[in-house]
Amino acid sequence: MKYLLPHSTGVKTIQFSVSERASSPKARGTVLSAQDLTKLWDKQGYPVTPESRPLFHNLNEILPDGPTPEQQACLDLYETIRQHVQAPIFTQENPGLARAWFGTRLKTAGYLFNDREAIIVSITDRIPTRTLFHELSHLKLRWVDRFPQLTLPDPRRNKPVEKLLNNELDHLEFLPREFEIFGPRAREKWTKEYSQFPSTRGPIDKALAFPLVAIRSLLAQHVLLPPHRKKINQTARRLELQSEVDAFVKGMTKLSPNRSDMIKFALDQFQISRSGAKIRTESPDTGKPLIQTIV
């Protein structure tokens, strides 16, 4: 199976064979038992194997007693995607591939995609149900809602900002729904995530710190409860970035939900040149994404 994966210089074609995908001992010539193939989708999460398999291909086997409300939310989200596009979604246990693309800090799973198919790769043989909902929400924004994604030149310098904008602007759209379904624990997880900033020694480069603090302040304003915004606001004040952050949040809020205009505004605020920057909108039905140069 071939995947066209986002790459630092555009799009990179990678051909995966079963042996290349297999990075866990289970996949190295081991015949999967019937028990492995029929693990239940329970509170531990959705079962995956070292071989890529279509999402929900054996639903009756893994959910013999029917879905919980959280599982049903995943099924409803998947159905919404399928109603609009026929592009398949696969799952796979592949910690090597997952961490190669998403970094060693990845705790559960992430998604890779091209215009015609996607795969959710997990570091274990279970994808937590909340994580599954989260990754499907990203796919819905790209495939169904056709939210554009930013691609910047000079990846060594700009990749962190590109990833930050694409990922967090997605979160701005669907985290409220995730909190509604999965409750306080989901909100607590993201509150902790957004409140933690990299530790530094010596003087802080405000130009490098500003994008992270500004984006997290935007998310805090619209996604987190007022008491949970305190630490993020304290960080902005400590770095003497409060006025710039306030202007950023106000400007982005005014432009929402126009994703393209929000991206342009953010680049200008972060003092990143638009030269060579592009906005990519997926088109899974045709396999021909719309790629526009930012002007």
Image (cartoon, rainbow, N blue to C red):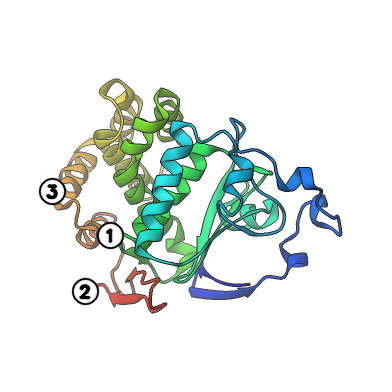
Q: Quickly name the residue at label 2.
A: 295
Q: Quadrant of the N terminus?
A: bottom right
Distance from the alpha carbon under mark 1 to that under mark 3: 16 Å
Q: From where the camera sits, is residue 38 visible?
A: yes
At horizontal 37% and vertical 75% (from top left) the residue drawn is: 289
At horizontal 44% and vertical 50% (from top left) the residue drawn is: 136
Query: Hey, what amino acid is under mark 3?
Result: Lys
Disc nearest the viewer among 3 and 2:
3
Q: Quickly name the residue at label 1.
A: 267
As displayed, is residue 192 above or below residue 255?
above
Distance from the alpha carbon under mark 1 to that under mark 2: 11 Å
Front residue of 222/294: it is 222
As displayed, is residue 202 above or below residue 102?
above
Asked whether, in this view, residue 52 is left or right of residue 176, the answer is right
Mark 3 Cα-neighbour bin, 10 Å: few <14, some 14–19, many ≥20: few
As displayed, is residue 9 above or below residue 261?
below
Q: Earlier in the sequence, mark 1 or mark 2?
A: 1
- Tell me where residue 277 appears, x and y as whole percent: 33, 71
